[in-house]
């Protein structure tokens, strides 16, 4: 039987109370760096947690919109957006260097993540913002998205991301958080969701259709109430499915 090794990531540094308890069960993390939430103190503390748990670190830049937690599309000039994204990543990178931790990836947050998945011109702006990191940092992207195609064409290193605790629509967009079916809360269902993607490169959508979807990394949202329960269950049960965490 084949063995499958997976990267499980969490978005962190977002003020979740039990966040420190998540780290033993993940292999990479994306740290909020001031756009939607976060400051030097939270970044430093989160980098230290990652280092102590042998968890890879990435930047989680967002629209500079803490009022809406970066979850609303923002009308902002290209120049201002590029400057903000670069400032956010640079601040985290400085902290990582001070702590002796490598910065390994960039994963945009919330509305910015969703917008560049479908808006080609905005995706171009985002890639311009992260141009200094093209050769040495991975960019986390949704499968089949505009940002994936552009990033590959322009020579960026990418990792396709799937969401372990979110349901998908038939067009592979995420079911809106306003919908009661947005989140997968049952740990057993999360494992089935991951298993299908890992082993068959397929996902069962919220409409019960089966679509092609490949992933190199899986996100469990740290602010989901069941996050710790889900991660502990995956840690215990994945090996029985021949799926192992790639620390």
Image: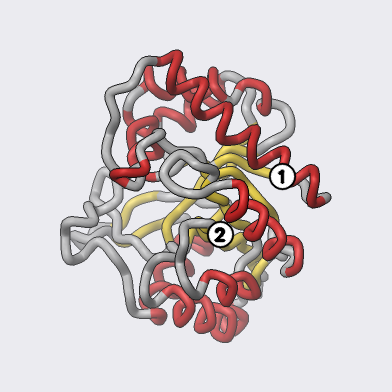
Foreground of the two, 41 or 159: 41
**Residue 208 percent across, percent down from the top left:** 22, 63
Query: Which type of secondary structure does the marked residue at label 1 adopt?
Result: helix
Q: Is residue 60 left or right of residue 3?
A: left
204 or 227, which lies in front? 227
Query: Which comes before the other along the chain, label 2 or label 1?
Result: 2
Q: Quadrant of residue 157?
A: top right
Above/below status of 24 relative to 59: below
Quarter of the image with the C terminus is bottom right
Q: Residue at x 71, y 45 (%)?
A: 95
Label 2 CA crowd tier, 10 Å (few <14, some 14–19, many 20+) = many
What residue would you read off at disc 1? 95
Extreme-right residue of the structure: 100
User: Disc 2 and disc 1: Cα gap in Å?
Assistant: 20 Å
| Residue occupied by mark 2 | 9
**Label 1 Cα crowd, 10 Å radius (few <14 / some 14-19 / many 20+):** some
Asked if one can make out residue 226 in the rendered structure from this viewpoint, the answer is yes
Closer to the eye: label 2 or 1:
1
* Circle on res. 74: none
Residue located at (29% from left, 50% from top): 174
Q: Write down the quadrant of residue 45 in the picture.
A: bottom right
Rendered view: 28 above or below 78: below
Residue 142 visible, this orientation: no
Residue under the image location 40 percent in, 72 percent down = 190
Residue sitting at x 54%, y 43%: 33
Left or right: where 4 falls relative to 79: right
Tell which of 123 and 46 is nearer to you: 46
Q: Secondary structure at mark 2?
A: strand
Location of the N terminus (image quadrant): bottom right
């Amino acid at each position: 039987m084949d063995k499958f090794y997976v990267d499980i990531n969490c978005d962190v540094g977002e003020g979740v109370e039990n966040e420190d308890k998540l780290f033993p069960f993940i292999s990479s993390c994306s740290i909020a760096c001031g756009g939607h939430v976060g400051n030097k103190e939270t970044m430093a503390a989160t980098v230290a947690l990652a280092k102590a748990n042998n968890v890879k670190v990435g930047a989680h830049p967002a629209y500079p919109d803490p009022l809406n937690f970066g979850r609303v599309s923002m009308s902002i000039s290209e120049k201002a957006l590029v400057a903000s994204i670069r400032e956010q990543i640079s601040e985290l990178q400085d902290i990582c260097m001070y702590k002796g931790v490598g910065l390994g990836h960039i994963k945009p947050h919330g509305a910015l993540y969703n917008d560049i998945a479908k808006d080609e011109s905005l995706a171009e702006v985002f890639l311009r913002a992260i141009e200094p990191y093209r050769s040495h940092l991975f960019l986390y992207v949704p499968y089949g998205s505009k940002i994936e195609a552009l990033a590959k064409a322009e020579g960026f290193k990418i990792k396709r991301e799937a969401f372990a605790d979110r349901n998908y629509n038939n067009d592979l967009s995420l079911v809106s958080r306003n919908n009661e079916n947005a989140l997968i809360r049952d740990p057993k269902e999360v494992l089935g969701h991951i298993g299908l993607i890992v082993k068959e490169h397929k996902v069962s959508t919220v409409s019960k259709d089966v679509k092609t979807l490949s992933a190199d990394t899986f996100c469990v949202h740290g602010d989901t109430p069941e996050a710790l329960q889900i991660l502990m269950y995956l840690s215990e049960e994945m090996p029985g499915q021949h799926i192992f965490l790639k620390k």
